[in-house]
Amino acid sequence: MAPKGSGSLPTSAAGRLARMGVMGAGVIGRNALARVRKIGAGPERRREIDRRTHEDNAVHIFGAMAHMKGAFMKLGQLLSLQAHALPEPYVRRLSELQWEAPPMHGTLMRMQFRNELGRNPEEAFLGFEREAFAAASLGQVHRATLHGGGPVAVKIQYPGIERTIESDFANLRAMLSTIRLSREQYGEVWEAVEEVRRHFAREVDYVQEADTIEEFRRLLRDRDDVRIPRVHRELSARRVLTMEYLEGRHLRDWLATNPSQGERDSAATRLLDLFFRQAVDFGLLHADPHPGNYLFMEGGRIGLLDFGCSKRFERGWIEEHRRLFRIPVGDGDTLERHYQKFHLTDPRDPRRAEKRSALLRMQRVDISKYHEARPFDFSDAGHLREMVSCLRELATLGLTTPGFVLYLRAKLGLYTLFHQMGARVDCHKVLQQYV
Amino acid sequence: MGRRETKKEATQKKILDVSLQLFQKSGFGRTTMRDIARRSGIALGTTYNYFPTKEHLALYFFERALDHVMERYRREEPPDAPLEERIFLLLSLELEEIAPYEEFLHLIVTHALVPTSRLHPFSVDSQRLKNRYLEFVGRMLEEARDRGEFHAAGMDSMIFSAFWVFHLGIMMYWLNDPSRKKEDTYILLDKSLRFILGALRGTPSHGPKRKR
C-alpha cells in the first residue's frame, strides 16, 4: 500500500496525536457531509453515498495507521482478521495494510543492526540484501546468507518503537472515541485494542520471540508436515532476529497456483489439527492467525512464522475448554453450568435467558461442526458472519474473558483463512484426538 | 603532500589532542594556550603560530572532523540511494565522528552561542568550515538533481542557509538526546529529511522502494 502523507514516522506522542486528531476530524467531517448529501436522495443513491463515505474514511484511517508503523501496523493486521465486522471498503484497505508499511532505508537499517549486534550486516553475513523482502509488524525482513552457507531471514525492528507503544495506545483510544466507533457497535475492535496492547510489550522483544520459536520447535519436532524456522541466536538480539529462511508461498500466492480441493482441504485440516494441538496439548497458542504468518511449502508442508504474539493457557482452562466440546448440542443446562465455572453465568442473573440463548447459538454455530462426522464447508460466508455476530453477542453480554477473546479470535482467524481457502474440514475427526 | 606539511599536520594534531584532553579536564574557559603548549611540549610561540586562539583550535577540530566525514562518506555512499538516505548517511557519519568528544562539545556550545565568538556558526572565522561543508552538500544536491530526483527550481542559496541551520539543529538535538544510543536523533533526522526533501521535490516522499 502506498502510504499517505510524507511517509515519515511520527515518533513524538504529540506528533502522532496531532496526526490522529486531524484524522478523526476528517472522518467526522465526511460523515456529516454524507448525512447532508443523503437528504432527499433515493435509496440507491443513499447506499452509494454511504459506500463512498466509508471508502474515503477507510483510506484516511488506514493510510494514517500504516504511516504510524508499529502498533498501528499490528493493529491493522489484527482488525483485518475481524474485518467482516467492518464495512467492505475498510476490509479492503486493511488487507492491503497487512502486506506493507513504510520502510527504513538501508542506512537506518544498518545503523539499527549495528546498534544491536555491534557490526554491520555485511560483516555478520556472507551476503545481505539491502532491500527488505517483507514488512514485519515492527520492522522489516531482509534476506541474507550465513557465512557457513544457508539462507536466513533477518527481522530488524524500527528504532524507538518500544518507548512509543504505550502512548500509541493511549492515542488510539482517543482516536476511536473521536470517530465514534461505539463500544456496542464495534465491541470487538475495542477488545482487540486492549488485547494487542497487553501483548505488545512482549512482542517488541525479539529475544522472547526467539525463546517461543524454540519452544514451538521442541513441541512440534515430531511433525514432519510443519516447519518452524531455526533461530540463529548469535545473530539475534532484542531488536534483530535471524531465522532460517523458509521457502514457500503466502496464502494469496498459493491460491493463485490453483491448488486442488484436496490440497486445500488437507492444508486446512492440518492447520486445524495444529490449532488444537497447541491449545489443548501445549497450552501455548501461536495466537496471531494472520494469513501472512503461514507459508504453504513444497510437499504440502506448512510453515509457521512470527511467534511474537503467542498466548499461554493454564491447565484448568484447557480442561474446561475440552469439556465444552463434549456438551451435547442444545443442552442449555450443561452449557450454563459450564460457564458458571468462569463466573460468566449466574442463575440469578436477570439476563440469564439472553445469555443462555447466546451460548446455545454459539454452540449451534461453532461447536456443532465438531459433533458431525462429515466435512464442514468453510467456503460458506454465512457461517463466518454468524460466528462474528455470535462473538459480538457474547462480548456484549459479558460472556467472554481476555483468554477467551484471544482464543476465539485465533479460531476465527483460522476459520477466515479456511474460508479464503474454500476448504472443507472434517472437524469432528480432527477434534477426536484432543477431547 | 610534502614532508614539511606532514610534519606540520602532525604537530597540529598533537596540539589538538592535548588541548581536547585539557578542555575536557579543566573546561574550555579555564584552559590557557600556555597550558596547552606546556603539556604538548611545544614552544608557546610555535603553538600560537598554528593556533592564535583556543577558538582556532576548536575550529581546527571541526575542520579535521569534516575531512574524516567527507572521506568516509565517499567510501560508504550507497550507489542507488535517494537523497534522503545520502544526507542521512552524511549526518550520521558526522555524529559518529564527534561522538567521542561529546563532553568537549558540551563545553564549547555555550561559547559558540555568543554572537562575537569565532566559533559562532555564522561568524567570519567559521565561514570557511561552513562553506566547505555546504559545497559538499551542494554537490550532493546537484547529483540528485542530475539523477532527476528533483528540479533545480528550489536550489537557491536560501536552501543552503536552511540546511546549515538544520544541520546545527540536529547536532544540538543529539547533544541533548537522552534516548538509548541517541536513537531519537536518528528518528528525527529520518523524519525531517523525508519531510524537507518531499517539500523540495514538491511531492510527498515515499522513501526507498521495496522489493516484492
Image: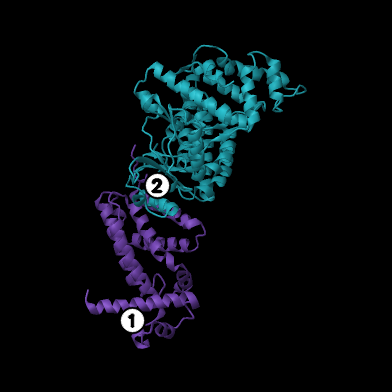
Give the side of residue B120 with respect to residue A16, left or right: left
Q: Tag 2's secondary structure?
A: loop
Q: Which residue is mark 1?
A: B50
Q: Position of residue A267 (x, y in %)?
A: 43, 22
Give the side of residue B37 with respect to residue A14, left or right: left
- Residue at 47% x, 36% y is A306
Query: Residue B119 got which mark?
Result: none
Q: Position of residue A357 (x, y in %)?
A: 67, 17
Name the image quarter holding the N terminus of chain A.
top left
Q: Where, by quadrant of the figure, is residue A409 drawn?
A: top right
Three-letter amino acid code of the residue under disc 2 = Met
Q: Look at the image and give the colour of chain A.
A: cyan
Looking at the picture, does residue A288 appear above or below residue A127?
above
Q: Tag 1's secondary structure?
A: helix
- Residue at 47% x, 61% y is B173
Q: Look at the image and give the colour of chain B.
A: purple
Q: CA distance from mark 1 to mark 2?
A: 45 Å
Looking at the picture, does residue A251 appear above or below residue A146?
above
Q: Are the residues flagged by discs 1 and 2 from a single subunit? A: no
What color scheme is it? by chain
Q: Residues within 10 Å of mark 2 (few under 14, many from 20)?
A: many
Q: Which residue is mark 2?
A: A104
Q: Where, by quadrant of the figure, is residue A98 drawn?
A: top left
Residue found at the very far right of the displayed protein: A348
Give the side of residue B210 with respect to residue A179, left or right: left
Q: Residues within 10 Å of mark 1 (few under 14, many from 20)?
A: some
Looking at the picture, does residue B69 appear above or below residue A327?
below
Q: Where, by quadrant of the figure, is residue A347 drawn?
A: top right
Name the image quarter holding the C terminus of chain A.
top right
Q: Nearer the viewer, residue B57 or B163?
A: B57
Report whether residue B56 is seen. Answer: no
